[in-house]
Amino acid sequence: MSNFPDYDLSTATWHKSSYSGGGGNECLEVANGHPALVPVRDSKNPLGPKLVFPASAWSTFVEDLKHA
C-alpha cells in the first residue's frame, strides 16, 4: 500500500526548459496547471513514470541549482 496519492496527469500540458539542448532528447519536462505540485517526467519516455514534487520543494531545488 502506498502513502502517496495518485495524481491524474492525463490532461497535463508538458513543457521543456528553454535551456534544453537542440536535440531535446535528454530533457526533463514539467507540467503547469497544478498550483501546489510540480509534475516532472523524462522527455525520452513521455508515457513512463512521472514524479510529483510539492511546489515549494521544487522552487528550493531550482534556486539551489542557480547557485551551484
Image (cartoon, rainbow, N blue to C red):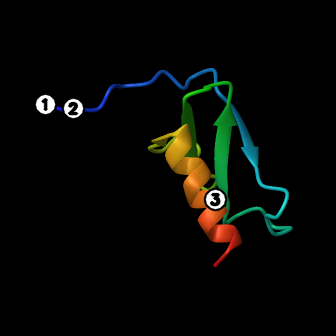
Q: Amino acid at mark 2?
A: Asn
Residue mark closest to the camera, 3 vs 1: 3
Q: Would you say residue 41 is visible in this rendering? A: no
66, above or below 28, in the image = below
7 horizontally vs 24: left or right: left
Q: Nearer the viewer, residue 5 or 22?
A: 5
Q: Could you classify mark 2 by the number of other residues whose Cα lies within 10 Å: few (under 14), some (14-19), or many (20 or more)?
A: few
Q: Would you say residue 57 is visible in this rendering? A: yes
Q: Amino acid at mark 1?
A: Met
* Mark toward the start of the polypeptide (2 vs 3): 2
Outermost residue to the left = 1
Q: Could you classify mark 1 by the number of other residues whose Cα lies within 10 Å: few (under 14), some (14-19), or many (20 or more)?
A: few
Question: Residue 32, percent across and down?
Answer: 69, 32
Element under label 2?
Answer: loop
**Residue located 86% across and 67% down the image:** 22
> Residue 3, which numbered label?
2
Q: How many marks?
A: 3
- Residue at mark 3: 62
